[in-house]
Amino acid sequence: MEPVDIGLWGVPLAILGGAIRVSTPFIFVSLGECLTERSGRINLGLEGTLVFGAMSGYAVAYETGNPFIGVLAAALAGACFGLLHGWICKFKGVNDIAVGIAMMLFGMGLAFFFGKPYIQPQAPDLPAISFGFWSDIPQVQAALQVNVLFIAGGILAVAMAWMFRSTRVGLTVRVVGDSTDAARAMGLNPDRVRLLSTAAGGALAGIGGAYLSLYYPGSWTEGISSGQGLMAIALVIFARWNPINCFWAALLFGGAGALGPALQSVGVSEGYYLFFAAPYVLTLVLLIMTSSPDRALQGAPLELSLTK
Amino acid sequence: MWRSKAWITLSKASSVPQAKMSLTDQTKMARQLASAQIISALRLRAEGVLIPLGALVAGFIAFSIFLVLLGKSPFEFFSLVWKGGFSSAFSWQNTLSRVAPLVFAALCVALPARLGLVVIGGEGAIVLGGLAAAVAGTALGGLPAVLGMPLMALAGMVLGGLWIGAIGALRIKRGVNETISSLLMAYIAIALFNHFVEGPFRDPASLNKPSTAPLADSLRVGDMPFIAAHWGVLAGVIACILCWVLIDRTTVGFAARIAGDNVRAAQIQGLPVAKLVIGFTALGGAFAGLAGYFEVAAVHGSANASLIAGYGYTGILVAFLARHNPLAILPVAILLGGIEASGGLIQRRMELPDATILVFEGMVFIIILLSEALYGKLGIFKTNAGGTR
């Protein structure tokens, strides 16, 4: 089909389509980080987990021929990184922010190390569902190609919000995140809860990475992630540790990320690199606006070192 | 209650003034106390050297196991590191060329760390500092080197200082987490750098690799006599010594250490915490900018994508390995500079991917942080006075 000339309408349409495409890794990483932070710990290493998830997901999908097995492998790998992070942070005197930086370097190093042979071959892509069948305009159809993981992310956000609000597991995580002492008094083991929350968060970040290499951009390269794992962490603060807000914030960030390519598609190439910086600038501005020097952040888990 | 807390931090930060105090008391008990504290201070110092060294060795062992599991020889790896980084004049040249940017990048982490801030965006200040220096160099082409060189360095330092100083200001004025903001700013800095190098400041003659205009020969920084390294290495050594004096021997540094231990106590004592935070982050950023200046003026000759070499990230590891002590930064930077310099040789001889060094660095980094849990726990370092970490 030939693209129909729809003029400047192409820009918002491309941003919408881009938001749906680009936001999926943000959704998974931010939901994972939301869970980890709700238990009172911060994992800054999710950028490394994301990259390793992208590599392992791609490699396994290529070897088995099934992208979903790749996603599963990425989740497992992410859980391992989370377990390591959680185990290290258990010790007194260890700075969880610094450990996150080290895990970021380590995860990226391992991904590049083992990912070298998978840069060339082509792994099967994750399937997408077309919601644009009602339209004859190919741009609309392209924009409404929605990947199954995006839908899964939306469902997960709702499920996690429900979990925090009305289940025993959610309550356990929240108690541990708000007061270590109260959790101990209740007979909970805060270290174990945080370990499992960090592992689950890592698994979600791994899935986010698998989306990068298996759907969009859809191949494994060493430059596959450009700080999405890190932006997702800032996004959790902006979303006030609420899973539903995380979903909307991720869409917003996806839209910002799609701004550059969208403008390029209608012929605006001036300042391409500046538009490329849009998501980082947006993150920073939102971070500045939502932070506060003197009062505790609303909705923040009380045991979180980030806000102490 | 806060008073006693602040007093504890004071006594922990330095045992020397206290020893003097107790001697003025002229009592036998005080004298005993003083000598006990000198011994405990020595023990703490030994702890501060031996634990990182032990962690480094543990990192080497962990990486050796990793290599054995892959069927590669750790012995070969370490002998290649020796060969590629330290064995000959040529390899030393290769190593020392990395030392200057690593030292400056590490200072950009270590200075804010003394105030309890984890700033990891030094890469942004290096890249922008290099760009500012290159642009200033083009504009100042006609000036004699005596004037042009310092002005170029100043341009790099000012932009780097503003860039990282802004992170400190955001932290203290708005409560923005400095770790996240510094890394975001590093991405923004690289985008800005690419925009300017490929746009407004691009030299039309640079076809394949967009660059700024090449510097005049008179503005290039040369090699030092007798040592195969440019003057930036000496500047790095001087910067380390100056930072050590600043932190360990001046009242400003003393105030910074108090604020780093306990911000609230420092504020109640009336210390200018905001000024300290902004000043230390800006100074760190200025050093990172200086790294960019030397990379441009001594190595590349213009600002281009080669400037984005990841020194800012290796510098984080250098600073943590050195436990944010400026004097320890230099040997650690030489060690890591040598390891990175041998990367190419290891890649060719052992048929390992270039990310091998990154895996190694990640492992060492994790183990160094893990070793932080050991302070005050090992029996041999147990002290009566100072062991209450």
Image: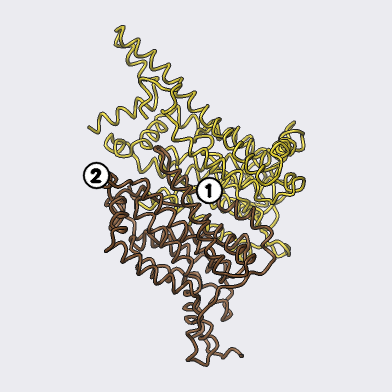
Label 1 to label 2, Cα distance in Å? 43 Å
In the image, B67 versus B34, the foreground residue is B67
> Would residue B230 be visible to someone looking at this image?
no
Q: Which mark is residue B340?
A: none
Residue drawn 30% across the image and 47% down it = A188
What residue is rendered at 59% in x and 74% in y? A269
Identify the colour of chain A in the image: brown
Q: Amino acid at mark 1?
A: Gly
**Near-viewer residue (A15 or A113):** A113
Q: Is residue B126 shown left or right of residue A121?
A: left
Instruction: Report the chain holding disc 1.
Output: B
Image quadrant holding the N terminus of chain B, namely: top left
Mark 2 secondary-structure assignment: helix
| Residue B206 quadrant | bottom right
Q: Colour of chain B?
A: yellow
Disc 2 residue type (three-letter): Ala
Q: Which quadrant would the C terminus of chain B be assigned to in this image?
A: top left
Tell me how the rendering is colored.
by chain
Counting from the top left corner in percent of width and height, residue A52 is at 56, 57
Residue receiving disc 2: A185
**Quadrant hosting residue B277:** top left
Residue A255 at x, y = what percent?
Answer: 46, 73
| Residue hosting label 1 | B122
Residue B370 seen by the camera: yes
B304 with respect to A149 (left or right): right
The residue carrying pointer 1 sits among few (fewer than 14), some (14 to 19) or many (20 or more) residues within 10 Å by Cα, namely many
